[in-house]
Image (cartoon, rainbow, N blue to C red):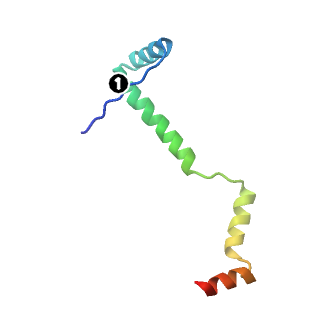
Amino acid sequence: MVSSRSSARVPEKTWDFVLEAADALGVIVSDFIAIAALHEAHKVLERERTVTVTREYASAFLSALDNPSAPNHALLTAAKRS
């Protein structure tokens, strides 16, 4: 397993809080930080990769895909150029 080293400057109260939480879980601080960072990374990426829409919007979107409009003049002209 390959590991990376990192350092961060945090306020003393924050560090003490992290130490207390790591101790409560019975893990060393570096493991606690890695677990917390991984958990937060999953949340961030899930939020960034997911699009949430209302039922009405989803229904309208799917309907538009199933029933596309006829191509307009500009689209037909562009298609001829390519």
Quarter where residue 23 is shown = top left
In this view, which residue lies farthest toward the front? 81
Q: Residue 73, position in %: x, y?
A: 74, 83
Q: Quadrant of the C terminus?
A: bottom right
Quarter where residue 35 is shown = top left
Q: Quick check: 38 left or right of 59?
A: left
Residue at 46% across / 19% down in the picture?
A: 10
In this view, which residue lies farthest toward the left? 1
Q: Amino acid at mark 1?
A: Ser
Q: Secondary structure at mark 1?
A: helix
In this view, which residue lies farthest toward the bottom? 80
Residue at 58% across / 51% down in the picture?
A: 50
Foreground pick, 60 / 75: 75
Foreground pick, 82 / 10: 82
Q: Which residue is mark 1?
A: 30
Local packing at callout 1 (Cα closer than 10 Å; few below 14, some 14-19, many 20+) is: few
Residue at 45% across / 16% down in the picture?
A: 15
Q: Quick check: 14 left or right of 56?
A: left
Q: Residue 57, position in %: x, y?
A: 73, 59
Residue at 31% across / 30% down in the picture?
A: 5
Q: Is residue 55 above or below residue 66?
A: above
Q: Residue 12, position in %: x, y?
A: 47, 12
Q: Is residue 40 above or below residue 73?
A: above
